[in-house]
Image: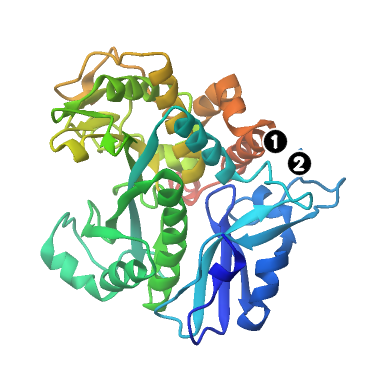
Amino acid sequence: MAKSDFGLPKGTHTVVIGVGDVNGIMRGKRIPASHWQSICKSGNALSLALFAIDMTCDVWDTPYVNFDNGYPDMHLFPMTKPVSVPWEEGVAMCMGRAEGMDHKPVPIDPRNVLVRQVERAKKMGYTVNVGTEVEFYLLDPETKQPRDAGIQVYGLERAAELEHVLGPIRQQINEMGIPIEQSNPEYAPGQVEVNLRYGEALEAVDRLVMFRSLVKQLAASHGYLATFMSKPFFEQSGNGFHTHYSLWKGGKNAFAKKGKLSDVGRSYLAGMQSRMAEMAICGATTPNAYRRRQPFTFCPTNTTWGIDNRTVGLRVIEGAESAVRVEKRDGSADCNPYLLVAAEIAAGLDGIEGKMKPTAETTGNGYLDEDATPIPADISDALALARGSKWLKDLMGNDLYEIALQQSEREVEFVASQVTPVEVDRYLGNF
């Protein structure tokens, strides 16, 4: 896009520009409007370490960014036209793109993994559409507990109670060009779900990365702490991230055949099913994320599939030609959506190229299917599968593969080295 296309909304004094880091957390800078044209022309310098820091911003020596090479710079350029932030007068925001000092894409930028799979699909004649559903908690920032009590999933009274914060999330974020279809209370106090309208894969994931950042900002302005953490409370529902896929060719849904899943759709389904366990680390990157993997919790524990069945890992939705799609249900809300969606698309395209066929449909309770391939319920198992996966390494590229897996390995070590309050309460006075 030409730099003239990046004009600012009238009255803008500050521009926020950011990219998704190794966790899909949006990071960047705030820039005076007076300096904006210079940014459009030359970019904004910031450290490559942005793509090699954990969720706490801790940094460690990685193969691509380290003390030996001095943690060099990259440049951030606008990728979309800035749009006004409704709750911050004079502030506009946009997605950025990272460029190395050699003027090439940054190899450890997770977005580029998705770019490659979208381009692969295009060469096969397909446009990949993705719809996303994401869950999060709205908590008291002091107590870090819900302000409401009791489970009121889909409850209209609970929805009305939360409207003072969920209303602005729907309306004002929608005004910023992120199309929100609906919101509802979920299966826990303080938990909600928001559905974003489907779109072309890159655009859909860019929107989700920005959405998570905007939700946290907007919730804070209303006195709430919003968290996408996978499992904040063990006894309550975890935060999931569901993805809905369809491939389009010539303006038609290639997954649909008279309202049913087509052979192309079944092969895509089979491809995802075959790699679901292997890619588990992409959708659940911390030890906490695997606490969601509990039977009978609507978080899948295996690679079963079924039609309109919420006990399976892959749910097929049939009906109108435009609506036929495959939903993958195991991702956690705090994962990096660039990496997870890229892995899901890669596996699905493999399925199409190999004309793969899925296992037999599960028509009952997927949790009870003893023949189904399990999804790792422990991060150590997920890491072992990932470390043995040439497919995953080729997907991410060596350097990003190492950074992503090293981060998860560091999280395992960190959690394992803690004495928890539960242990103190249970053992200290009894031994």
Q: Nearer the viewer, residue 196 or 248?
A: 248
Numbered label attached to residue 399: 1
- Mark 1 belongs to which amino acid? Asp
Q: How far apart in space, not on screen, are marks 1 and 2 (Cα)? A: 6 Å
Numbered label attached to residue 64: 2
- Mark 2 belongs to which amino acid? Tyr
Can see residue 58? no
For label 1, the SS is: helix
Q: Position of residue 321 (x, y in %)?
A: 17, 36
For label 2, the SS is: loop
Name the residue located 47 percent from the left edge and 48 percent from the top edge: 429
Q: Position of residue 38 (x, y in %)?
A: 70, 73
Name the residue located 21 percent from the left edge and 40 percent from the top edge: 322
Q: Earlier in the sequence, mark 1 or mark 2?
A: 2
Q: Nearer the viewer, residue 240 or 90?
A: 90
Q: Nearer the viewer, residue 58 or 209?
A: 209
Name the residue located 53 percent from the left edge and 22 percent from the top edge: 385
